[in-house]
Each structure stands twice: as C-alpha cells, then as structure tokens.
Amino acid sequence: MVGPHGRLKALRFRGQRELRKRHAPDLVIDQTLYWKVIASADEAWFFAGMLNSHAMTDAITPFNPKGAFGERHIHALPYRLMPAFDASNEDHLRIGLLAREASGIVGTMVAADAYLNDPTRPLHIRRGRVREALVETEVAQELEQLCAAALGTTVLGEETEELEVDQDNA
C-alpha cells in the first residue's frame, strides 16, 4: 500500500475485517484472495507483468486441475513457478516497466470506450476486448517475450515445433 508522501508501507493486520475497516471499507474479499507484501514498486510491477502474461498461463496450465466447468483453482500455482524478483536483473526491471506501460495503455483504452468503461457489461467480454487490443502493441509483445524467457514457455502466437525422431537412430 502506498502511504503518505508516496512511500510504500507494509501492512500488518489480523484478517479481512481489519483490512476492510482500516484500509478499504468497500473491499469485498472471498476465500480465494491471495496477497503478498511487496518491497518496492519495481517488484510489484514485475509481479503484475508476470501474473498477467500468456507465458504464465502456459506455465501453469499443465498443473491446473480441470473440473466439470473447465480449468479451475489456479490459486498459488503462479507463485510456485515464478522466479523471485531480482532488482539487479535487467529483464525483471524491464518486465516491471513494460507492465506499468501496459497498464497505462489499458487505462487510456478503457477511458475512451464507453462499453469497456461500463461495469454493468460482462467482464469476460470487456477483458477479452482489452486483451485483443493490447496483444497488438509492441509493449505487450516485448513483455510476453521477457515473461516467456523467465518462465521457459512459448510466446503468445508462437507455434511450438514438433521434434521429428529418426526411428532408425533413436
């Protein structure tokens, strides 16, 4: 949370009620809220970039249980696969910077589009439209490349090559 004078501050609280009472009275929390204390804005933007990337989706999909209504319960999977933030790693810093830029692009996009800015419209449709537009930007493309490299997955839209096995020499 950002405190007075723009400084980041760590919060200690005893649970949902205390959080809502002190810091966010209109906040609704269910059992799937996960939170983490982040040491810096750079680290926070790194996490935002990684968590919202297609590369992360690719990385967690093999471990994601499927129920009657499709994939579910990703919960802590991203945190098990994501590298720890390293402030001395240029790629980590760049991921954070690009995530911040992408956030600005989306903010401008939503402000300029009445449909996207209407909370009564279906969230999945608004989210899909934003992703479709964002994926075309150079910012999102570079962000995906860096996240894929950090996670060892493929980049959105990139086809994976099938390895041909020479049966005679296998």
Image: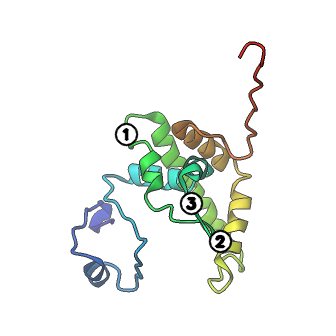
**Residue 132, image x and y in percent?**
74, 60
Q: Quadrant of the N terminus?
A: bottom left
Q: What residue is shown at x 47% (from left), y 53% (from top)?
A: 78
Tell me which label, 3 or 2, sits earlier in the chain: 3
Q: Which residue is mark 3?
A: 103
Above or below — where is 98 with respect to 115? above
**Residue 12, image x and y in percent?**
21, 68
| SS for dot 2 | helix
Residue type, mark 3 in image: Ser
Above or below — where is 154 with respect to 21? above
User: Marks 3 and 2, how far apart in space?
Assistant: 10 Å
Asked whether, in this view, residue 114 is left or right of residue 87, the answer is: right
User: Marks 3 and 1, how far apart in space?
Assistant: 21 Å
Q: Are marks 1 and 2 in contact (CB under 8 Å)?
A: no
Q: Which residue is mark 1?
A: 87
Q: What residue is shown at x 68% (from left), y 83% (from top)?
A: 121
Q: Are marks 3 and 2 in contact (CB under 8 Å)?
A: no
Within 10 Å of disc 3 (Cα), the crowding (few <14, some 14-19, many 20+) is some
Label ID, residue 110: 2
**Residue 115 in which image quadrant:** bottom right
Within 10 Å of disc 2 (Cα), the crowding (few <14, some 14-19, many 20+) is some
